[in-house]
Image: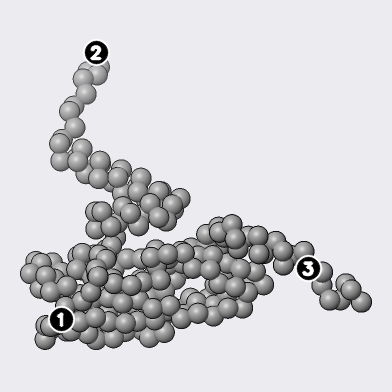
Amino acid sequence: MTDTTKTPMDPKNKTVLQLVGVVVFMGSLAWASVPLYDWFCRVTGWGGATDVAEAAMDEPLEQTVVVRFDASKASDMPWEFKPVEREMTIRIGEEGLAFYEAYNPTDRAIAGTASFNVAPFAAGAFFSKIHCFCFEMQVLQPGERVTMPVNFFVEPEILDDPDAKYAKTITLSYTFHKTDLPEDYLEQQASLDKVPDQQDLN
C-alpha cells in the first residue's frame, strides 16, 4: 500500500518560498505600476531606494565617494535621455548637483515619469535627494530639449553601516516611462490636430 502521508515542509524552505513569492509579486506590480513600485522601494529599501531630505549637512566630512549617473528608458518611451556628466566625486554630507538631459524627437507632446534606484542596494538608505525631476511628471513638447537637475547628498551614517560603509562608488540610475498626458495637454494637442496643414489650404 502506498504511503500518502505528506512530509511537513521545512520552515526555512517555506520562508524562502514566501520571499521568492513576494519578489515575483512586487516585480509584476512594478511592471504594471511605476508609482506603486517606487512606493514599495521607499518603504522597504528594496532596489536601493533613496531617501528624501530638505538639506545637506552644514559641515561635510572629509571622506569622499564617487557618484556615477546612469540613464535608461522603457521600450515605449520615444525620448532621448542621458546624464550630462557620468560621475562626480563629493564629500560625504556635501550637497551634489547633477543634470540629466531629455529630448522629445517626435511631433507630439510626450509625458514621462522617472523611476530610480541606487547601487549597491545597501547604500540606497543613505543616499538622500533634496530636489529631483523624478518627484513629478515631466512633459516635453515636440522637439523640446530640457536639462533636469537632481540635488543629493550621502548621509554620514553610511560609515556606520556594516555593508554600505565599503561602497566607494555609488550609482544613481533613472528609467523614464511614458505616461498619459494630463487633460490640459490633451486638449491642447487636440486643438493643434484640428489646425489644417498649410499645404491643404493651397
Provide the secondary structure element on which disc 2 rests: loop
Report, in whole angstroms, how far the alpha carbon at label 3 lies from the one at label 1: 55 Å
Residue 141, numbered label:
none
Residue position marked by numbered label 2 in the rendering: 1
Relative to 147, does residue 117 appear above or below in the rendering? above
Report, in whole angstroms, how far the alpha carbon at label 3 lies from the one at label 2: 82 Å
| Amino acid, disc 1 | Asp
Of mark 3 and mark 1, the one earlier in the sequence is 1
Of mark 2 and mark 1, the one earlier in the sequence is 2
Q: Crowdedness of circle 2 by 10 Å Cα count: few (<14), some, many (20+)?
A: few
Q: Quadrant of residue 83?
A: bottom left
| Amino acid, disc 2 | Met
Q: Residue at x 55, y 72 (%)?
A: 140
Q: Quadrant of the C terminus?
A: bottom right
Of mark 3 and mark 2, the one earlier in the sequence is 2
Residue 58, numbered label:
1
Q: Is residue 23 left or right of residue 187?
A: left
The foreground one among 36 and 185 is 185
Residue position marked by numbered label 3 in the rendering: 195
Residue 173 rendering spot, x and y as whole percentages: 35, 71
